[in-house]
DNA sequence: CAGCATCCATCATGATACTG
DNA sequence: CAGTATCATGATGGATGCTG
């Protein structure tokens, strides 16, 4: 019956759909957006401040993508001027532990990575120029 | 020395270094490369076959980046013609569980995401055209 | 406030050709 | 086999100005 069982847990056949999903949800900005929204809902400009280096266009694009994928909800309050709140959805919430784990992983691993980079870069500036 | 829980409510100070690391290791191709190499070492063209839709240039770039970050090791055997094997490093291995969890997450979540996309796209094709 | 529209620079990717 | 080099192109990102 079975095709090889390559993985520790289970190894489903990953179609391009799955990769696309990760691609849309795990990109640089989306990860930080979701992380921020896991704490509490935020308005557009609050998000901009929460993620200092992002500019308006990519932020908007990422939010739309996350909204389309059902990860965040966009709530418009018709005051004057309008207030727009972004809130994480239950689906998005299922990513929280993973995101925390990833961020934690970076803090643990970064030192080793920086060492590796130095070694790599050193042997790049090689002799025989 | 305990750092408190890696929960998002406890936001660890994530510098841009941390984001950059995730960015270099979690991108579309790298994720699949690491996943493939977690099973067993692979040669360059084996990797190309393992990740069908990737072309040579981005694959090479991703491998170099992963190598620089200490995630994979490039082993050259000076036969004729040369054989080059890519192998996951101990550091890279620390990502395996996370990657498995992410891939598993996609399989669990994809159906809900697809529903969300339909809803979103439906209300995009709105009236008043 | 929360965007969208526009222009422009940069980058990643694809295709192709060439090397040891 | 395992790349590098080059060119063309399409997608992204920054900056700016405008809207309700």
Image (cartoon, coloured by chain):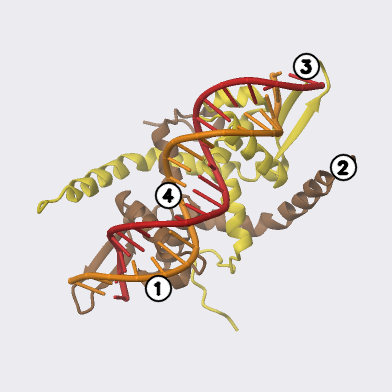
Chain colours: A yellow, B brown, C orange, D red
Looking at the picture, how far across and down is residue C19, in whole percent? Answer: 22, 70
Residue annotated with mark 2: B129
Please state the horizontal and vertical placement of residue D16, each as a whole percent of the image. 56, 21
- Looking at the rendered image, the quarter that the N terminus of chain A falls into is bottom right
How far, Cα to Cα, is label 1 from label 4? 20 Å
Q: Mark 4 — residue? A: B25
Marked residue chain, label 1: B
Secondary structure at numbered mark 2: loop
Question: In 3D space, how far apart are the residues under numbered discs 4 and 2 (Cα atoms)?
Answer: 43 Å
Nearer to us of marks 2 and 3 is 2
Alpha carbon of mark 4 to alpha carbon of mark 3: how far? 41 Å
Residue topped by disc 3: A81
Q: Are marks 1 and 4 on the same chain?
A: yes
> Label 3 marks which chain's residue?
A
Coordinates of residue B57 in the picture (x, y in percent): 40, 60
Left or right of A57 on screen, residue B64: left
């Amino acid at each position: 019956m079975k095709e090889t069982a390559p993985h520790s847990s289970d190894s489903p056949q990953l179609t391009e759909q799955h990769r696309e999903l990760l691609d849309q949800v795990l990109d640089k900005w989306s990860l930080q957006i979701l992380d921020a929204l896991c704490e509490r809902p935020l308005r557009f400009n609050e998000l901009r401040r929460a993620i200092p280096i992002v500019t308006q266009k990519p932020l908007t694009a990422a939010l739309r993508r996350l909204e389309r994928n059902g990860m965040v909800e966009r709530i418009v309050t018709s005051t004057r001027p309008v207030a727009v709140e972004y809130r994480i959805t239950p689906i998005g919430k299922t990513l929280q532990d993973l995101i925390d784990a990833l961020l934690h992983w970076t803090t643990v691993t970064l030192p080793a990575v920086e060492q590796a980079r130095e070694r790599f870069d050193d042997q790049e500036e090689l002799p025989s120029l």
